[in-house]
Amino acid sequence: MSIDLSQFIPSFLEESLEGLELMETSLLNLQQGDDDSINAIFRAAHSIKGGAGTFGFNEVTEFTHLVETLLDEMRDGRREVAQPDIELLLVSVDCLRMLIEAIRDEETCNNSNILATAKRLELALDHSNSESKCKLSNETSDQQNNTNATWLITFVPEPHLVQTGNDPLLLFNALSELGEVSLEAHSKDIPSLLELDAEALYLSWSLAIKTSANEDDIKEVFEWVEDECQLTITKKPIDNQDEKALVTPLHDEMVELPLAKQNPSTAVSITQEKKSQKAKNDSGSIRVGVDKVDSLINLVGELVITQSMLSELGNDFEMSKLARLTTGLEQLLQNTKELQESVMRIRMLPISFVFNRFPRLVHDLSKKTGKEITLVIDGEQTELDKTVMEQIGDPLVHLVRNAVDHGIESKAVRLANGKAEKGTITLAAYHQGGNIVIEINDDGGGINRQAVFEKALEKGIVDANTTLSESQVFDLIFEPGFSTAKELSDISGRGVGMDVVKKNIQSLGGRIQIESEPGKGSQFKVYLPLTLAILDGQLVKVGSEVYIIPLVTIVESLQVKEQLVNRVSGDMVLYRLREDNVPIIPIYNLFNIPAENKEISNALLVVVEADGQKVGLMVDDLLAQQQVVVKSLNENYQQVDGISGATILGDGSVAMILDIPGMIQMALKKSQRAQQVKLAKKPQLEGVSS
Amino acid sequence: MSKILVVDDSNSIRDMVSFTLKSAGYDTIEARDGQQGLSKAKSNSFDLVISDVNMPIMDGITLCSELRKLPSFKFTPVLMLTTESSVDMKMRGKAAGATGWLVKPFNPEKLLATIKRVIR
Amino acid sequence: MDIQALAAEIPMEGEYNLEGIDFISSGKQFLAFILAQEQYAVDILCVEEIRSWENPTKIPNAPNYVKGVINMRGIIVPIIDLRLKFGIGDANYSETTVVIVLKVESEDKFRTIGFVVDAVSDVLNSEDDEVKNAPDFGGCVPQNYIDGLINVGDNVVTLLNVQALQAIEAH
């Protein structure tokens, strides 16, 4: 029989990765004399080594052994906790992470870095490697000589042997696995009753075993008790006549043991099911606290009760029961609401999962840039949707890198400006309204508006006459191809980053806002919806169609005042909203559908904002505001310009959810095309006239 | 039905050992550190205790000596699971009253064969 | 109206014989329907449901044959009018107008799409060799949509390729 342990591999890999995270966090904060941390780090490495060995992940085992040995010296006090060693251990953690991820993703890991780090570890260790290398015992009890031989064993245990929990009879039992055993017990040493210690052992034995195993195998059976007994093992060649006279049978104490079973000694069979290995960004599963599940079970229970109550009411319904029906429906609403919240909470995980990579990141970046930076993390228990969290990681990394690279000034500059030598970057997360807000703040030099504007001018993103508000200038940073870095910094990249960051955030239904004060620092605020599946929407009517405008995009709704409408350069219609000139988008036009009112002069306008751009959407009527469940059109149809999804309204009909940035793009393209058509016609007219 | 207490802070190791033992027909109860192991021992009787050495809160060596103080565990076999096979380790184990040790990594067959020395 | 009800109308073996309707033997089964007085059919295994016509929600800037989407038990299902897509007959919507909802394989997933037809006809059985090749004589339905022809009594039924039906020009 070979037991298949491959089912435990995924959990071992996950456990190991968590262990590595723990090691990293502890290492980053490690001080001399912090024995608890050192022990915790050691234990984590120890567990990884043990498990890796069991599954045959030899590379991991060997590497971890080096790490473990170094840590062992530290916890023993044989080695001081020094910074170079900590750096080496941090790099080692990275290497192990790579190795384990490679196993998890079924890829080969050929990183020269790993070999180099292993060498460094070996160098750092005091004694030579061969001594401390663990004997990987994928043991196989060798059946080296297949010739049967008889061995004579005398076993004289010390009296206190049983107090170690060993039982000679069971040892003989184990021995019988190797071959046929016959034995004889000797009771000559049993003292008189008065001197007898009930918990002591006074017997000794002579045994004979016929086996093809070698001496070491036999010795091994007794390995635990070798210090507590006198053991002799001698080999006797097979001689049929001698055998019978070997042991004089004493009827009382003769124990005949059954034939040894053939123990096939095979290594662990690991049937690695390729399909069961998880992919890198594992969005396939989620860990949920039992409390969340229990809460869910309770709520479903209440829902069931409400349902049966309503069902019963419906059976012989009469108007007299109306009041109870209303109550029941209210209860249903309550149950559904609570259930919805509860279910959504299941997808929510604390943002610490994302934040925990930053201490290490900032640590490494500080070293690289030579700046001293403290990272402050706040609100790491703030929860957000799992999918949102998986995708917000990279943008946040970029923003933090940006803060280190461009935000915090060099030590010299900081001191010259009377600032503390150490810069501070703060990562904070909190809930606000229906959003989660993530702040990346630095106390660096702030963003130079002038420089930004000039760069944008240079790149042709704006022209000299454009007047922009402060926040609009900062938003220029998000334009593709923008970068004010004088040197090509390999940390933040070449301006390819910020526009992607903004795009990623927007694709999650969020937005990013910049605030900055020259000399004091900058604040990047990322707003994200708490969930992707549900949206707060404003229902509007255009013609016979109902559309949904995401509430988060709405600035205000108003009735058009004719005098504030201005037609500019032909096609564009602008509405004067205080100091802003807001372009009007007639939805019926954009979507080619009939509308009740095509006259702008007395239209209803819903002013929305996206990408810092305000537009006024012309609608026929404002309907209710409600929470809607977002359903994708991509499932059965395809992407539609200007529409971000669909939902099912209370009456069972489908309503489209407007994609505001998309609509703005559509309107832009439409008017650009109209312009081009106009321009194309112009020369002909001139040609005619001249 | 022989009952075995499995103590290890690594979930996957614990699961594996437990799985292996159960497949061979043994009954198992698990604990994730020495402390928990000790409290399980106080409320159950076991035919064998298999414990890792390196664990938080209470390590295996301490668990062993604590177990030996309990009357019901005076002669119960206690096996230490360890990746170290040093003499020092054996001495410490013995001093705490351990019955024997198993060196990690081990394969399931080896585990089952070895425990036959101390359990039926 | 659903498939089960329709299938139940097929007489069991040993029961009375109806002219023009084959018995369930081997080979494939098809659902036949009418478009502009002509018979067409699709593989019955793709048919999920048959619904009566209801006004769908329009999709902005969609081709004219994409009538919109409907809510089918919580799923958003697009509705394509085959009469408009193939440019045959009059696309009017009456009480007999029917939507055949098909489950179509698309890349690595399945899509649910509803197709508007004039009326549903019968369930047909045919052996594989009864499906003849359709000569390319330039009919209103493009060749890539046609899998073959089946003779049923005096009529000819055009077998449509379900895969091809779901093609919608990007817009």
Image (cartoon, coloured by chain):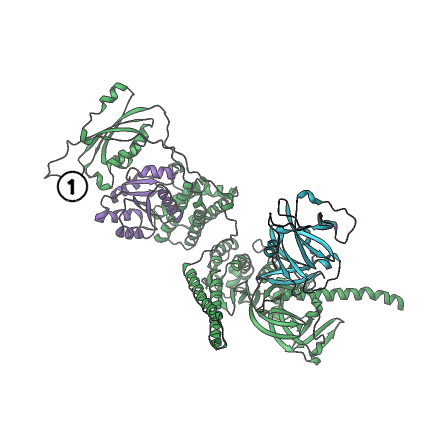
Chain colours: A green, B purple, C cyan
Where are the magenta residues, as a range? C135-142
Above or below, A561 relative to A75? below
C74 with respect to A245 (left or right): right
B119 with respect to A551 (left or right): left
Where does the image place residue A70, in percent across and percent down from the top left?
Answer: 39, 45
**Quadrant where the C terminus of chain A lies?**
bottom right
Main SS of the magenta part reads loop
Above or below, A147 relative to A584? above
Going 24% across and 38% down the picture, which residue do you hit? A167
Going 27% across and 19% down the picture, which residue do you hit? A240
Q: Determine if the magenta segment contains residue A130.
A: no
Viewer-nearest residue: C48 or C79: C48
Tell me the SS state at disc 1.
Answer: loop
Where does the image place residue A107, in percent across and percent down from the top left?
Answer: 53, 43
Above or below, A371 relative to C29? below
A454 with respect to B85 (left or right): right
Tag 1 residue: A198
Viewer-nearest residue: C32 or C164: C32
B31 with respect to A353 (left or right): left
Q: Determine if the magenta segment contains residue C136.
A: yes
